[in-house]
């Protein structure tokens, strides 16, 4: 297990993203290129894992597509086999746990199909299509990852029943993966994306979540998913290319209908919540640095907020890219390289990296501990130098209102919850 701020070659570990039976995935910083990346490192002594990851690299380099995760580098560093990849915000599995608009879901579905169709065009069967293997990047960009189980389609295909059991096709579970197996798994992924439910065997139609699916998509789209999830591979789409073509045909038809409605004067308008968010950003964005979006409701939030002021969700900006150079392995908020502790979550100490102290224009106050007197940024909860809790309430410039529970400044005319302690805001 690598620790935060530990170095491996030119990479500095920022925190762990996930841990599996074969490997750990870390968020890291490339000290030469000055970029953030993801590192996939097989667990020590796992030679089987190394062989699979070597195969993953060899397959991934054959695929060049905007919706397929790129392998930046692969090498042996300090007796570790290290795969450096692009670093995203979160997986599709994390995103589907929160509310998502139908328009955005359709966009993600199109990107997922485009990625799989490109792999099938290159005669590669992924064999492990699931939400965890789709990574989201800024701008709603989706990329397919993890080709460790991928098989190259030949005249005779020998393969095990590798894959994730919840999304695996029946014939793949018996060791006979086909292009239709990926189509089956993709059908389940999209079904969950739009219905919020993952069906279980025997996949008889209508399945669990069908009511919500029918309320969100057209009958033709639901029929496309039904065909993809047929138990008999012969009744599914032959490959992802055909499934993508059908998706594009349905989308084109929907766009034509939408344009016809627009010509008739039935244009949509912004919701009251979006109008409220725009007005809030106009007034408080520079003060609060609300450059992130809540993981649940997508409202504007700041990295320092403990809760979403719109829906009350805990640590709403978790996983977002920080303007600070490192991140706390506990809460994943940004930290500076010369801090001794996380100032947001009372997190543990870090690997000592430097004794130098860096000036920063964001510092606005000093620690109340007379032995420390370290500099503080607005809305810090703890001193990053000595861990003393900040006692003096932070005020919000531009607002005269404070939270009744914690006494910190709040935007009462906009917020439903206090962003610092999650107390409901009373609108008097």
Image (tube, grey):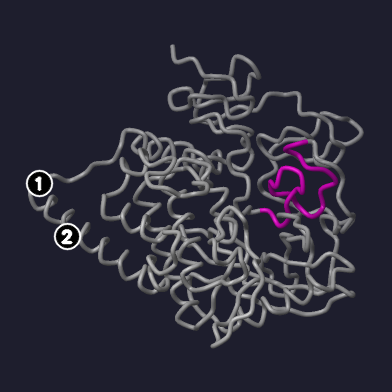
- The residue furthest left is 264
**Of discs 1 and 2, which sits in the foreground?**
2
Indicate the position of residue 419 as horizontal and vertical percent values.
58, 29
State yes or no: residue 328 in magenta.
Answer: yes
Circle 2 residue: 256
Quadrant of the image containing the C terminus: top left
Residue range corresponding to the magenta coloring: 324-345
On screen, residue 332 versus residue 133, left or right, reads: right
Indicate the position of residue 394 as horizontal and vertical percent values.
65, 28
Q: How many marks?
A: 2
Sequence-first disc among 1 and 2: 2
**In the structure shown, which secondary structural element does the residue marked by tag 1 occupy?**
loop
Quarter-of-image position of residue 254:
bottom left
- Does 347 sit above or below residue 2? above
- The residue furthest bottom is 155
Say which mark, if any, is on residue 265: 1
- Does 90 sit above or below residue 149? above
| Mark 1 residue crowding within 10 angstroms, few (<14) / some (14–19) / many (20+) | few
């Amino acid at each position: 297990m690598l620790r935060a701020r530990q170095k491996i070659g030119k990479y500095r570990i920022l925190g762990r993203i996930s841990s599996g039976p074969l490997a750990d995935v870390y968020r890291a910083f490339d000290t030469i290129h000055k970029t953030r990346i993801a590192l996939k490192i097989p667990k020590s002594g796992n030679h089987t894992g190394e062989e699979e990851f070597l195969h993953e690299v060899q397959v991934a380099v054959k695929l060049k597509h905007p919706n397929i995760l790129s392998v930046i580098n692969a090498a042996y560093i300090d007796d570790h086999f290290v795969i450096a990849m692009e670093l995203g915000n979160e997986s599709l599995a994390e995103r589907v746990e929160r509310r998502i608009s139908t328009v955005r879901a359709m966009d993600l579905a199109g990107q997922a199909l485009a990625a799989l169709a490109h792999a099938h065009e290159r005669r590669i069967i992924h064999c492990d299509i699931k939400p965890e293997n789709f990574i989201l990047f800024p701008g709603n960009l989706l990329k397919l990852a993890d080709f460790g189980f991928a098989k190259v389609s030949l005249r005779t295909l020998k393969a095990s029943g590798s894959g994730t059991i919840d999304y695996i096709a029946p014939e793949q579970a018996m060791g006979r993966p086909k292009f239709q197996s990926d189509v089956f798994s993709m059908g389940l992924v999209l079904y969950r994306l739009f219905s919020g439910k993952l069906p279980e065997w025997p996949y008889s139609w209508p399945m669990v979540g069908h009511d919500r699916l029918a309320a969100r998509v057209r009958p033709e789209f639901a029929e496309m998913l039904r065909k993809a999830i047929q138990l008999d591979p012969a009744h599914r789409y032959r490959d992802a290319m055909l499934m993508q073509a059908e998706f594009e045909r349905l989308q084109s038809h929907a766009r034509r209908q939408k344009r016809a409605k627009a010509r008739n004067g039935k244009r949509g308008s912004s919701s009251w919540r979006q109008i409220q968010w725009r007005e809030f950003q106009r007034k408080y964005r520079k003060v609060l640095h609300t450059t992130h979006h809540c993981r649940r409701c997508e409202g504007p939030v700041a990295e320092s907020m403990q809760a979403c002021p719109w829906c009350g969700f805990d640590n709403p900006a978790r996983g977002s890219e920080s303007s600070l150079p490192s991140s706390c392995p506990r809460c994943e908020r940004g930290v500076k390289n010369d801090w001794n502790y996380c100032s947001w979550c009372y997190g543990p100490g870090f690997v000592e990296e430097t004794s130098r102290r860096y000036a920063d224009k964001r510092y606005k106050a000093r620690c109340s501990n007379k032995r420390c007197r370290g500099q503080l940024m607005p809305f810090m909860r703890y001193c990053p130098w000595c861990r003393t809790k900040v006692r003096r309430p932070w005020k919000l410039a531009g607002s005269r209102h404070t939270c009744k529970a914690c006494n910190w400044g709040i935007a009462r005319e906009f917020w439903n919850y206090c962003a610092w302690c999650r107390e409901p805001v009373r609108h008097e």
